[in-house]
Image: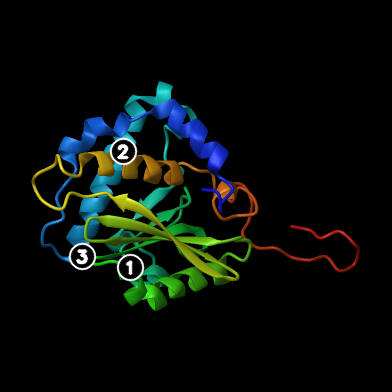
Amino acid sequence: MNRLDLSADFADYERAIGDTFASILDDVPVVGSASKDEYVKRFLDVVGLMRAHAKTHRQSFGRHSCMSYDISHGRAFSEELLLLQPGAAFTMNVDDDPSLRNVHIIVEAVNESGAEKYLEHLGLLADYALALWKCQPTRTFVPVLFLHAHDLDLLVFTRRGYYVAPVGPVLFERDDIYDMSGDISESLRHLWFLLTLPANKFGFLFDSHEFPHDVSIDTSSVPATI
């Protein structure tokens, strides 16, 4: 949060919602053995649980009661996204079919465990970031979520490189929920914070729900026009 200049926002958020996601843990699925599509769906089911819970408790969640983005998965992908074949994507709230121009966060998923598993897939994750930057030049950085086994990592790609922030476990590793329940509850709080941030707080120069992605420079006068 320090690197993203979000420490104050996150502190306010934590004070407001407390440990509220503990009440949905009984419904969080186990990783299990599954196809990539089913594996991603289990993760998205967790997002749906958080979404419903925050909506029900909107008074305590305040401005974090609604997720800032829509979800695209599988057949909902545009042709561009199908070529990239990510697990899922969080997109801007738009009426037309989601394309790379309105993708906010790409989610990649491999049902494999291991320390620093992202290193084995770093080239693909970087390709996602570069594809988004090409279509969205006003990005200050590009976040990519990487789901592996029961854990979720946030990779932040900047113009100078990247860094990794482990979000933590978001699925149960086995049926015994009590070993991991505290860690998952904390991870879900972190994830929901990221998913409810406005675009200009999480990688854009401004709120891209209201402004175009393209920037043009007017060379006939000194000021730049957007």
Amino acid, disc 1: Glu
Residue sitting at the far right: 221
Question: To which quarter of the image does residue 192 belong?
Answer: top left
Residue 6 % position (x, y): 55, 44
Q: Residues within 10 Å of mark 1 (few under 14, many from 20)?
A: few
Question: Which residue in the protein does label 3 denote?
Answer: 111
Residue at the image point whose x is 21% and y is 40% from the top: 181
Residue 116's label in the rendered image is 1
> Residue 161: percent from the left, percent from the top?
54, 71
N-term-proximal mark, 2 vs 1: 2
Residue 118 vs residue 135, the one in the foreground: 118
Task: Specify the color scheme.
Answer: rainbow
Closer to the camera in the image, 50 or 219: 50
Q: Residues within 10 Å of mark 3 (few under 14, many from 20)?
A: some
The correct choice, above or below, for 193 with respect to 158 in the image is: above
Image check: 188 left or right of 36? right
Task: Give the residue at mark 2.
Answer: 50
Front tag of 2 and 3: 3
Q: Residue at x 22, y 34 (%)?
A: 24
Question: Of tags 2 and 1, which is closer to the observer?
Answer: 1
Q: Amino acid at mark 2?
A: Met
Q: Secondary structure at mark 2?
A: helix
How far separated are the C-alphas under marks 1 and 3? 14 Å
Q: Are marks 2 and 1 in contact (CB under 8 Å)?
A: no
Name which quarter of the figure residue 218 lies in: bottom right
Horizontal placement of 219 versus 226: left or right? right
Residue 143 in view: yes
Q: Identify the residue shown where x is 31% and y is 38%.
A: 50
Determine if residue 61 is in view.
Answer: no
Q: Quadrant of the C terminus?
A: bottom right
